[in-house]
Image: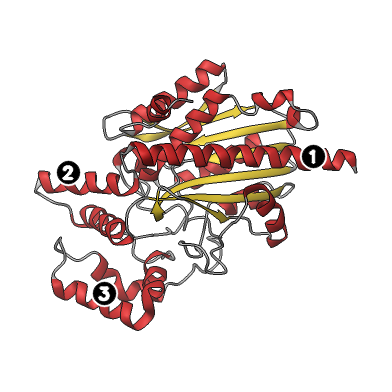
Amino acid sequence: MENHQIAALFSANYAEARDKFLRAAARRGLAVESHELALAGAQGEVLATDVVLDGPADASKMLVVISGVHGVEGFCGSAIQTGMLDLGAPAQAQARPQGAHDTAVLYVHAVNPYGFSHLRRATQENIDLNRNFVDFSKPLPVNAGYAEIHELLLPPEWPPQPRTEGLLDAYRERHGARGLQRATSLGQHVHADGLHYGGTEPAWSNRTFREILKRYAPKVRELASIDIHTGLGPYGVGERIFASFDEAVLERATRWWGELTSVTTGTSTSIPLTGPIQTALAEECPQALHVGICLEYGTWPMARVSAAMRAEHWLHRHGCADAAKATAIRQEMKDAFFPDAEDWKLAAWQQGLQACQQALRGLEEDAAAKLAA
């Protein structure tokens, strides 16, 4: 694929991204199942989580490629999904022996279409989906650290006053940079207008994703997943974060994808989350062996990304009569999670393509090894 073709995979807004994804599926003659959200997009467009199955409906091996869990981060994942559809994997694998004919790719496009369209990480319920996949019948996780800094993160005025930032700096001094990240990002279920809110019930996107898995993966025995995110780490680098609950599959995941980081051991730029989407893969597909990663692309330094996210949440919480200021905040939010630069797009595509191909090869080779045993 030429550089100009790669650049064309990326879109300027959700509506364009969805159109490209749907057109790619149509070119392949693949059916699309659309789960529409009963809200309008930023341009008045239809909002939906769209699903495409590429491969046999009864495949026992499946790669699930997920985009847009954190809305505005969907620009990257959508481009990778569209490009993969154009390439036709796993159709290309049909020429290979053992197991390829029994492998499918399930593309779940824009898990959080509202956030994608409105340039938010959160859903229409202001929920961070990766903190929402918890058991709501049990006591919810408590994040005392967040309660201490909630008003400092989202003060009445923006930009924050020096005193406000000074108090946040003091918290960082006491608990370290990782401690501040944990307090801010772990997830919380008390402040409904706050950052990384996990909610008090399953969000629409949570319920929809579970329905998709129930429909498409009940017969799958070997399940690979790639959940695509942006905003953490060095510019253009796709960190591969181990994302399976079963540590016994770590050796297999490493064999497929190479060196992986881990939130549990502290080697990742991310931290352990209270309710990640991978919970649904484990709960809705208990019959399958799940091997998954989060593919987290770095954009800009953490200070810029964090400031953009705080500003956008401040706008959501307090509103702003200054239209120009509000527009600038939304644009910076988009820029922070989606660098509109050719080198970044090329790097994102190349690494995303490689990760998907490695997962498919791993599924097929493991199947071949079983047949030979």
The amino acid type, in three-letter code, at marker 2 is: Thr
Residue 287 in the image, given as x and y percentages of width and height? 74, 47
The amino acid type, in three-letter code, at marker 3 is: Leu
Q: Quadrant of residue 164?
A: bottom left
Q: For marks 2 and 1, give the one nearer the viewer.
A: 1
- Does residue 113 appear anywhere in the picture? no
Task: In the rendered structure, find residue 168 and report the number of the disc placed on it.
Answer: 3
Eyeballing the image, is 274 above or below 214? below
Residue 122 horizontal side relative to residue 308, left or right = right
Dot 1 falls on a residue whose secondary structure is helix
- For mark 3, does the 10 Å Cα neighbourhood hold few (<14), some (14 to 19), or many (20 or more) residues? some
Q: For marks 3 and 1, give the one nearer the viewer.
A: 1
Among the two numbered marks 3 and 1 on one chain, the one whose residue lies closer to the N terminus: 3
- Does residue 304 appear anywhere in the picture? yes
Label 1 sits on residue: 367
Q: Quadrant of residue 210?
A: top right
Dot 2 falls on a residue whose secondary structure is helix
Residue 289 horizontal side relative to residue 172, left or right = right
For image coordinates 68% across by 58% down, the residue present is 250
Which residue is at the front of the view, 16 or 351?
Answer: 351
Residue 154 in the image, given as x and y percentages of width and height? 24, 64
The quadrant of the rendering that contains the C terminus is top right
Which residue is at the front of the view, 233 or 308?
Answer: 233
Q: Are marks 3 and 1 in contact (CB under 8 Å)?
A: no
The amino acid type, in three-letter code, at marker 1 is: Ala
Residue 136 horizontal side relative to residue 219, left or right = left
Task: In the rendered structure, find residue 327 and report the number of the disc placed on it.
Answer: 2
Which residue is at the front of the view, 251 or 174?
Answer: 251
- For mark 1, does the 10 Å Cα neighbourhood hold few (<14), some (14 to 19), or many (20 or more) residues? some
Residue 73 in the image, given as x and y percentages of width and height? 39, 45
Work out how far the residue at label 3 is from the one at label 2, CA to CA, in angstroms.
26 Å
Task: In the rendered structure, find residue 165 and report the number of the disc placed on it.
Answer: none
